[in-house]
Amino acid sequence: MPDYRIDDLQINNLYLKQDKELFCFGTDAVLLANFALPKKNAEVLDIGTGNGIIPILLSAKCHAKKITAVEIQSPCARLAEENVQMNKLNDLIEIVHGDINNTDLFDKEFDYITCNPPYKKNGSGIKNPTSAVAIARHEITCTLDGLIKRSSDLLKDKGKIAMVHKPERLSEIIYLMKLNRIEPKRLQLIYAREGTAPCLILIEGAKNGGEELKILPPLYIYDKDGNYTANIADLYKKEK
């Protein structure tokens, strides 16, 4: 039997149902949803939506016209659909069960793409024995190369993609973005705490954008006592 829990997202009275056997969202999803800046009435696509956390958070943080969320794993897609219905967001968010590598999946382009992709290359690290978690963490069904190429195909001219990833793959991300006509525009380094190496990066690129990269101030997750910093705590309660 699935082991569910309901989490209060602490914004706009939103909740999220999570299956502990599947991949549960973490701080990286919250960071990405806050970092992403879709314009008003934008058509947004979230790639690899999992349980729907990013589009549901975006519903409270932006004024998108429509948010489409694609997920390859059927149990995760079903759970994401349940979360959309539970939060009464059916008119705003559409969950699509499918493979982003399928070029017939969408017949339109998008203004903005968000993605919290697998961080590890397939064959690297120790895979979680739960296949759903392995797919979420390792590039089994979608590689970084393929993801950025498909994102470029699916973006309108000057459309943007925002991604959270690991700092050790930053040079690869920038190379692949430029290779696929996506110009890096904003970059932010995330640290667990002061005095440590960065643990995450947030990066945004614009399709056919000009060459100008803005480096944002660093963001620290925990203070010296192990509590969330004020900046991180605010992310969980920032209203529309």
Image: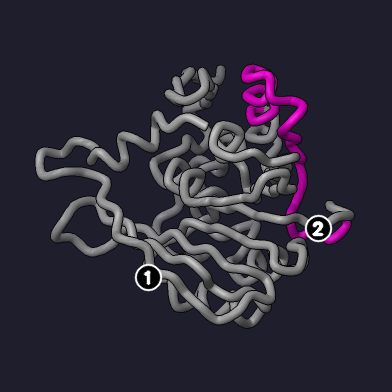
Q: Residue furthest left?
A: 225
SS at mark 1 in the image:
helix
Q: Residue at x 75, y 60 (%)?
A: 101
Q: Which residues are magenta?
A: 79-104
In the rendered image of this protein, does residue 27 appear above or below residue 83? below
Amino acid type, mark 1: Glu
Instruction: Assign a secondary structure to mark 2.
Output: loop
Q: Amino acid at mark 2?
A: Glu
- Residue where numbered disc 1 is placed: 168
| 210 vs 232, nearest the viewer | 210
Which x, y percent locates residue 98? 77, 46
Q: Is residue 179 left or right of residue 137?
A: right
Query: Which residue appears at 47% of the width and 51% of the height?
Result: 35
On residue 160, the disc is none
- Earlier in the chain: of badge 2 and badge 1, it is 2
Q: Is residue 167 left or right of residue 119?
A: left
Asked if the magenta segment contains residue 102, the reply would be: yes
Measuring 34% from the left and 35% from the top, which residue is drawn there? 234
Q: Residue 209 placed where, x, y %?
A: 64, 75
Question: Mark number for residue 109?
Answer: 2
What is the total number of numbered labels drawn onto the structure image? 2
